[in-house]
Amino acid sequence: MMVYAAIASRTFRRYATYRAATAAGVFTNSVFGFIMAFTYIALWHARPQLGGYDVADAVTYVWLGQSLLAPAALFGGGFQDEFSERIRSGDVAIDLYRPVDLQSWWLASDLGRAAFQFLGRGILPTFFGALAFDLTLPPRPGTWLAFLCAVFLGVVVSFGIRYLVCLTAFWLMDSTGVQQVAGFCGMFFSGMVLPLTVFPGWLGDVSLLLPWAACLQVPVDVFLGKHEGVQLLQTLGFQAIWAVVLLLAGRALSSLATRKVVVQGG
Amino acid sequence: MVDALRAYGWIITMWVRSTMAYRASFLMLTFGQFFGTGLDFVTIFIMFVHTDELGGFTLPEVGFIYATSGVAIGMADLLLGSIERIGQRIRDGSVDVMLVRPVSAFVQAAADRFALRRLGRILQSTAVLVWSLTVLDIHWTWDRVLLVPIMLICGTVIFCSVFVLGAAFQFAASDAAQVANAFTYGGNFLTQYPPTIFAKDLIKAATFAIPLAFVNWMPALHILDRADPLGLPKAFQFASPIAAAAITLVAGLAWRAGIRSYRSTGS
């Protein structure tokens, strides 16, 4: 267990090294937040209470989305580039004979990254948003705590998806195409471009059940106080179930890959 | 100039040939770009499931604004979007190699890893543009007809300049490439929507600071026969070429200043 904590804290520090990049990320997320907030305000002025949100909820949704984009790696990234490159180059063979579990290694690394990006890139955009717009902030400390749980579970689900995406490199060699498709799915079905509650008809119903919903839509709804009491537990349970299913699928697929696939030499 | 263009042609031909070595991958990535960038329009479409007007503009009108911005950034991204990778080259020292070659560093940086798959965004935006033009009931006069190609060309030039400005900035802060994204892709995001939904100060910034408003907002107001939310003189709606020339000049000077200030990492 100690070794995974060490991996996580080293990754945290590695990401913390790039201060200019972090500042640049905050700046870019904030610019997108401003533009997006105005598009949502226009929509919610035309249709108040759309998707169960008022204007303040909708604008809060935008800023939390910008804050969580990097920590939850909705568009991909994080350990993903490194891991798929190691599979492609064959370096993964070295990872496999290390006395640590492959999946847990990368999970620890990704949690370290997410923790840094949550603190370094997540807090400021929403803070700037709160300066410029009326946001819905949770009145109770319990809601903040539930939000942090939901973000954590969301990051684990996001890891579970991205790990599976990386593993396709064992068969495809170059997983760029799959990563691109996964990135766009992540943006669309997490609720990053529009809240899933606004999606029309069956598209909305289905997308609320997909794992990506656990990465952004659920944490934001928890923050906005849309789930209380038993419903809150059910919502967190929904995230936890996807996390477990995806992690188990990742284990199954990696054992299949390591048994059946010949690693690239060189 | 002729030499520079010829060199640009050679470099992009080389990259296209290397891309075509993996034809299936190229096709997948191009389709990926087509659908991926199309998600922005899907978002707008879903918004219009719930409302008939956004900021007083209908879906075909927003489609026209969306598409003209998309074609412009798509063209700019295809022609020299790779220049945003300059920060990485500054960090690993490979700008040195560019500087000793007998071709301008700008041409090399612009053509670096030329990515034909970026046609995906251009095709997608063109499809929306054609759709919007067939649905829209525009009162076509000769100046409106002329303004459509002018806005596409000027928009491309403006976005090219924004890409170059972002690259020049990386000579000062080599790992802050993301800042450039705020103005390139952020600028595209901004100009996908009609100006009327934004705060006046934001429109002013996009008109007078970084002339993104001249990519499509200003000419589109004339083509769609809409009032300017800032109440600026009518001349602004025809001023895209002037704005494009001005920002090109600034970008050119910034790039030169950047190259002059370059210090090799020495590795």
Image: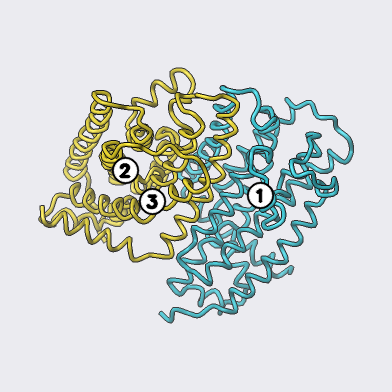
Chain colours: A yellow, B cyan
Give the Cα separation between the discs numbered 3 and 2: 24 Å
> Looking at numbered disc 1 in the image, what kind of residue is underneath it?
Asp
Q: Quadrant of residue A22?
A: bottom left
Asked whether, in this view, residue A203 is left or right of residue B134, the answer is left
Task: Give the residue at x 48% y 35%.
Answer: A56
Q: Chain of mark 2?
A: A
Query: Within 10 Å of the Cα at label 3, are there few (<14), some (14-19), or many (20+) other Cα atoms?
Result: some
* Residue under pointer 3: A123
Residue A170 % position (x, y)? 28, 46
Could you tell me if the residues under marks 1 and 3 are in contact, i.e. CB atoms within 8 Å? Answer: no
Mark nearest the camera among 3 and 2 is 3
Mark nearest the camera among 1 and 2 is 1
Labelled disc at residue B193: none
Pointer 3 or 2: first along the chain: 3
* Residue under pointer 1: B201
Residue A122 % position (x, y)? 38, 50
Give the Cα separation between the discs numbered 1 and 2: 40 Å
Q: Chain of mark 1?
A: B
